[in-house]
Amino acid sequence: MRWALVKVALAVTTMVVVAFAVPLGLVVKELARDRAYGSAERQAATIGPVLAITTDRTQLERAVASAETGPGGRIGVHVPANGRNGGGPAEIGVRRAAPADVAAAAKLGRASISPVPGGSSLLQPTAVASGIAVVEVFVPDAALTNGVTTSWAVLAAVGLALVIGSVAVADRLGTRMVRPAERLADAAHDLGRGKLGVRVPEDGPKELRLAAAAFNAMADQVVQLLANERELAADLSHRLRTPLTVLRLNAASLGDTPDADQTRAAVAQLEREVDQIIRTAREQQAHTRQAAAAAGCDAAEVIRERMAFWSALAEDEGRTVRVAGADRPVRLPVARPDLAAALDAMLGNVFRHTPEGTAFAVDVHNAEEAVIVLVSDAGPGIADPDAALRRGWSGGGRGQGPAVTEGGSTGLGLDIVRRLAESTGGDVRLGRSVLGGTEVRVWLALDGRREGHGERRGHRLRRTLGRRGRRATRPGS
């Protein structure tokens, strides 16, 4: 497309330049010719008044000398013979035209042009007492083309500049159209190869911007559909765990009969199939998270959305809720579903493991290299924070803090939050909040690297964010 536009611009501009330059060149040449003959007519006109007064040779020589311009020797006067005085014809100045041409001009009584060696002669007849005198003015060939070459060179330069300019403009316009199209094509190829995080910047012409917006919407929909499908498979597999465990325990108590052995074998086979489903779903979810994390999400928007969901339950239970730092965008290099799941895990445990009426707060702090999310409550707190951070630990009762998984669960509680933080190079820590209960601090690195920050630098940043979080959660702040 780019070269096609360049060729079209080159052809059109060349035709326009030729259509205007050729007639202008001919006009310039004709103007130079008219200018040369006009100058010759003016010189001849200066001799006419003198001839009308006298035909004296001396007077005429003076008039010719005064009318000469340039190197001289270009004006000649042909005076006819004076029959009353017996004088012969007079020739003053230089004569270049043939006698027949001079006689023809005198006979016709109007100006004419006679070709002579090196140029041409303008023959201007003038009436005198003895007849018709002819004034001859020599016009050299150089005068006929004076300035024509320069004018043609200027026209050629202007035409060439127009052609080059049109080609350059067409090339830039073609580039502006082709590059967005190439990016859209590359993104489509990447999406087809499984790179679900690829997106196209919406720039270029209006049509290509609309196409890029449609592509991005389609890619988001594909990611969402795949995430929903894989999360559904993972959820179904996890839900099968509990009844499968009960079934296995019941089968173990059937005794040693052949039917019992067959039942136990069937349960074992079913358990292996469920494990395979879970592993496959997790592998697929990992690819989906990577693609969604490439696009990132707005943490503030996710927090506002989830808090709107949990606020209804908090109102029913008489809980005081406070949200801080979610009033401006906070970009995170994590997938939106993962962040929402982590928030739901922490907030859900607040409701499960603290008494009704217990206040809680969610704070977001955005630093240069990290984002910290604090979930605090006014409950009794956690007796063993280290054990709470280990996967599979369950407090099994109320009053254990916001991130303790419920009794009998599969241990997804803080493990969901921990895996989210570690995927960015951050971590999760438990402590005592200023509300009196537990504080879960999720530290999310913005550059997504676990290494690359010095140990001292990482601890200093965590201490700074921790102090900011504790100050933000004090009553009345």
Image (spheres, rainbow, N blue to C red):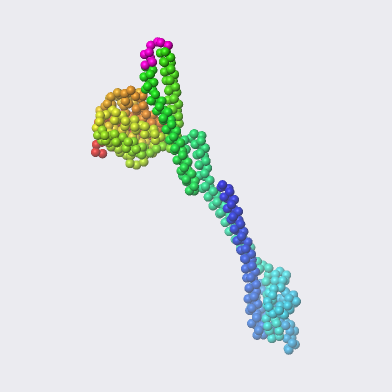
> Is residue 252 on the magenta stretch?
yes
In the image, the segment drawn in magenta is 250-258
- Quadrant including the C terminus: top left
Q: Is residue 16 visible?
A: yes
For image coordinates 60% across by 61% down, the residue present is 20
**Location of residue 49 in the rendering, given as x and y in whole percent from the top left corner:** 64, 82
Identity of the residue drawn at 62% across and 68% down: 31
Within the magenta stretch, is there residue 340? no
Q: Where is residue 9 in the image (x, y as percent from the top left)?
A: 58, 53
The answer to whether residue 278 is left or right of residue 469 is right
User: Is there any visible trace of residue 442 in the rendered image?
Assistant: no
Q: In this view, does 236 lie to the left or right of 132?
A: left
Does residue 377 lie above or below 172 as drawn? above
Q: In which quarter of the image is residue 160?
A: bottom right
Looking at the image, the residue that sits furthest to the top is: 256
Q: In this view, does 172 lie to the left or right of 144?
A: left
Tell me where residue 395 sits by quadrant. top left
Q: Nearer the viewer, residue 368 or 192?
A: 192
> Residue 224, image x and y in percent?
43, 35
Picture layout, residue 217 above or below residue 60: above
- 472 or 253: nearer the eye? 253
- Residue at 59% x, 52% y: name it: 8
